[in-house]
Image (tube, helix red, strand yellow):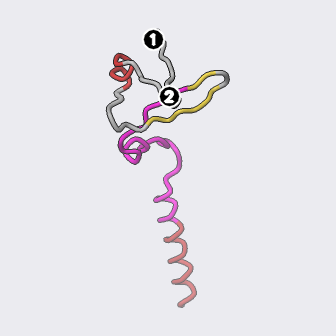
């Protein structure tokens, strides 16, 4: 387990083997958060939209629900026009 030192500015260098393992390249955004008594570094996806796609699989379809509501609204409008 590599040990790193902080600079005067509080900066650290992530060892090469860890950068390679996590896919951290120059310019990569990282999430840094405190968890209990330690810090956790998580690389963020380059394209957050693609990364989030399919995350709610199995849940209700909002588009289907909207289409059902629209259909009911159309039926109500048709009844009113008679």
The magenta segment is 40-68
Q: In this view, does 21 lie to the left or right of 33?
A: left
Residue receiving disc 2: 41
Residue 58 is inside the magenta segment: yes
| Residue 70 percent across, percent down from the top left | 50, 71
| Residue 52 percent across, percent down from the top left | 43, 43
Residue 37: image tag: none
Residue situated furthest top in the rendering? 1
Is residue 78 depicted above or below 44 in this figure?
below
Is residue 59 depicted above or below 12 in this figure?
below
Closer to us: 40 or 72? 40
Residue 2: image tag: 1
| Residue 45 percent across, percent down from the top left | 39, 38
Q: Picture quarter containing residue 79?
A: bottom right
Residue situated furthest bottom in the rendering? 82
Where is the C terminus found, in terms of image quarters? bottom right
């Amino acid at each position: 387990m590599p040990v790193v030192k902080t600079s005067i500015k509080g900066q650290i260098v992530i060892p090469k083997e860890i950068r390679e393992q996590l896919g951290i390249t120059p310019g990569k955004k990282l999430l840094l958060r405190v968890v209990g008594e330690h810090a956790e570094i998580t690389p963020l996806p380059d394209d957050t939209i693609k990364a989030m796609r399919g995350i709610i699989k199995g849940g209700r379809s909002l588009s289907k629900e909207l289409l059902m509501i629209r259909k009911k609204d159309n039926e109500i409008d048709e009844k009113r026009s008679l």
